[in-house]
Image (cartoon, helix red, strand yellow):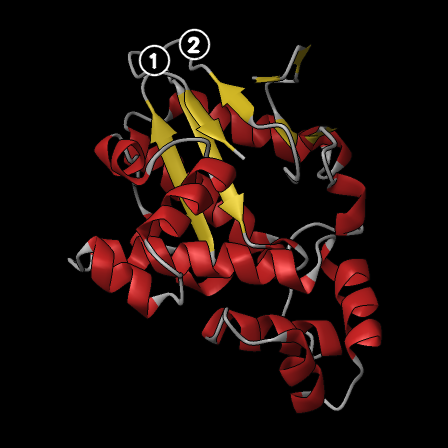
């Protein structure tokens, strides 16, 4: 795993805010990616999410060495990719803390429902000011409300396309100006065109991860590198 010229640990957590990561699977098991929305990650890891921005934190610094070793053994002994994903699913759910009501979590809920909501409208809905809301959101999740909304809209774009909508229908449903705007969103967030993304999209077990807003993706060593941003 590499970010620009920097080689990263094979087992780490990061919050990518700039400079895409390139992942090249090696060995018999390929790569397992766990992609967490900020509001879900805050319920699993204890460290403040702002510490993850463009950082590469070893899993041993987030969970005990014994837990990481047990996870390694589970992955090594699993016979299929689905067994590995099921094991990781269980591991993460064991660490999932209950939902905690807060200004930031309520803002994340509303932005998840409507990623196009303007900041002043969201702040008014939550009886807050835009400035206070932005600071509180950043402190809780390590990203701005605007960035969170953009990623939530990207999730909606993918969901609409998976449901069989045409690109024109996706553009309209997700509040984009035109299809050029759609292409720019894909290039900026995942580093490739919409067509390329859906051509080699990797999704295994994602339909069962709704409780924690998780998506787990698996790639085989023969696949070409996957780039995330």
Left or right? Give the position of 207 relative to 135: left
Residue at image coords 31%, 51%: 179
* Vertical placement of residue 206 versus 193, above or below: below
Q: Residue at x 18, y 60 (%)?
A: 165
As measured in the structure, the alpha-carbon distance from the residue carrying label 2 to the one carrying label 1 is 5 Å
In which quadrant is the C terminus drawn?
top right
Q: Earlier in the sequence, mark 2 or mark 1?
A: 2
Q: Which is more toward the observer, 33 or 160? A: 160
Say the numbered circle drawn on residue 134.
none
Q: Which quadrant is home to the N terminus?
A: top right
**Mark 2 Cα within 10 Å, few/some/many (few <14, many 20+)?**
few
Q: Is residue 96 visible?
A: no
Residue 221's label in the rendered image is 1
Task: Report whether 198 appears left or right of 221.
Answer: left
Query: Does 5 sit above or below residue 117?
Result: above
Is there a contact, CB below 8 Å, between mark 2 and mark 1? yes
Residue drawn at (44%, 29%) of the image: 32
Secondary-structure class at tag 2: loop
């Amino acid at each position: 795993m590499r970010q620009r010229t920097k080689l990263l640990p094979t087992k780490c957590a990061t919050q990518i805010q700039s400079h895409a990561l390139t992942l090249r699977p090696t060995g018999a098991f390929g790569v397992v990616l766990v992609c967490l929305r900020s509001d879900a990650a805050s319920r699993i890891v204890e460290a403040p999410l702002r510490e993850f921005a463009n950082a590469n934190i070893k899993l041993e610094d987030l969970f005990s060495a014994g837990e990481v070793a047990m996870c390694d053994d589970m992955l090594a002994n699993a016979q299929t990719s689905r067994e590995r994903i099921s094991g990781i699913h269980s591991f993460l759910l064991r660490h999932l803390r209950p939902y905690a009501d807060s200004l930031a979590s309520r803002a994340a809920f509303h932005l998840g429902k409507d990623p196009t909501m303007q900041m002043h409208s969201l702040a008014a809905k939550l009886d807050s000011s835009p400035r206070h809301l932005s600071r509180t959101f950043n402190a809780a999740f390590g990203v701005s409300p605007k960035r969170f909304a953009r990623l939530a809209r990207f999730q909606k774009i993918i969901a609409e396309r998976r449901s069989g909508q045409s690109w024109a229908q996706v553009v309209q449903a997700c509040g984009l100006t035109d299809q050029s705007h759609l292409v720019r969103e894909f290039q900026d967030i995942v580093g490739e065109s919409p067509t390329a993304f859906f051509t080699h999209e990797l999704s295994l077990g994602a339909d069962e991860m709704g409780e924690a807003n998780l998506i787990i993706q698996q790639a085989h060593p023969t696949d070409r590198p996957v780039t995330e941003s």
